[in-house]
Amino acid sequence: MPASALAQAADAALRVASLNLCTDELLLLLGQPQQIVSVSHLSHSPYETALWRVARRHPANDGKLESVIALRPQLILTMGGAGGARQTLARHFGARLIELAYPTTPAEVVAQASQVAALLRRSSAALPYRRQLAQLEATRPRLEEGAFLGGGGVSLSPQGLGASWLALAGFRQPALPNGRFNLEALATKPPKWLIRSDYRAEQVSRGTAWLKHPLVTRLAPRTLTTDGRAWTCGGLPMFAEVTRLRAKRAAR
């Protein structure tokens, strides 16, 4: 067997689990299917991620380390602090637990992708995202005011990761009291563009019903719909979303 084939076989033999929706995205987009032994149950839901069809090919876990131990992973990915006890437990069962920090910029998203790809022994898998970021930055459109609008009027911090992705799409997120819109603000000082999240829009709830108010719907000519699932983590799926938002704005 050629050396390259042997290396591929060795890489595929690495058993990896993810305990978090955001690390699920990284594992599903950067790993080989043969490497993935489990992803979090959230990734199996079409309400939470556009990757749900791919995710359902792999067993789901409940986000707890104990739920994947029986699958004998060698590498376990999660995001946010897990605590020393889980690190000790993982080592006891021969696994390496990687606790990633939540990224704060698109550049950190790409750097994190490179880190995970290296852990998966697939460094080249992150290169397309590095190139995509460079391309988006080089072709950044002129900024116009554009505010993100989620269920219940929730918006974004101008200094946050979501606002950085908006800027790559050509929109400047305004500062809003408590990081959210209210009906009065939309009536008296509507933004030039409204980037409306469709996250769980088909579900009847108080939060999503707010978006059907006449003061919101009258802004339809300058409202762009975005896949709210990608914004939950603000990770690699945002590249496709930024590209879509640019195209939608150009078409108006």
Image: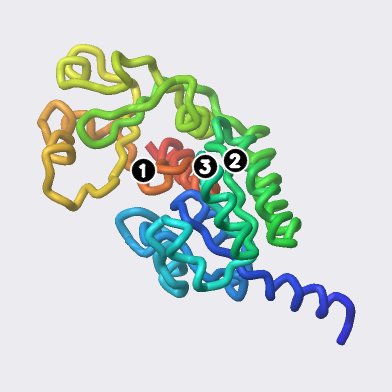
Q: Which residue is mark 3?
A: 83
- 116 to the left or right of 222: right
Q: Residue at x 39, y 55 (%)?
A: 49
Q: Position of residue 89 (x, y in %)?
A: 55, 56
141 and 56: which is toward the camera:
56
Q: Residue at x 55, y 31 (%)?
A: 104
Q: Residue at x 38, y 26 (%)?
A: 156
Q: Residues within 10 Å of mark 3 (few under 14, many from 20)?
A: few
- 177 to the left or right of 142: left
Q: Which residue is mark 1?
A: 226
Marks 3, 1: nearer the viewer? 3
Q: Which residue is mark 2?
A: 109
What element does badge 1 sit on? strand
Q: Position of residue 170 (x, y in %)?
A: 50, 29
- 83 to the left or right of 5: left
Q: Position of residue 121 (x, y in %)?
A: 74, 62
Q: CA distance from mark 1 to mark 2?
A: 19 Å
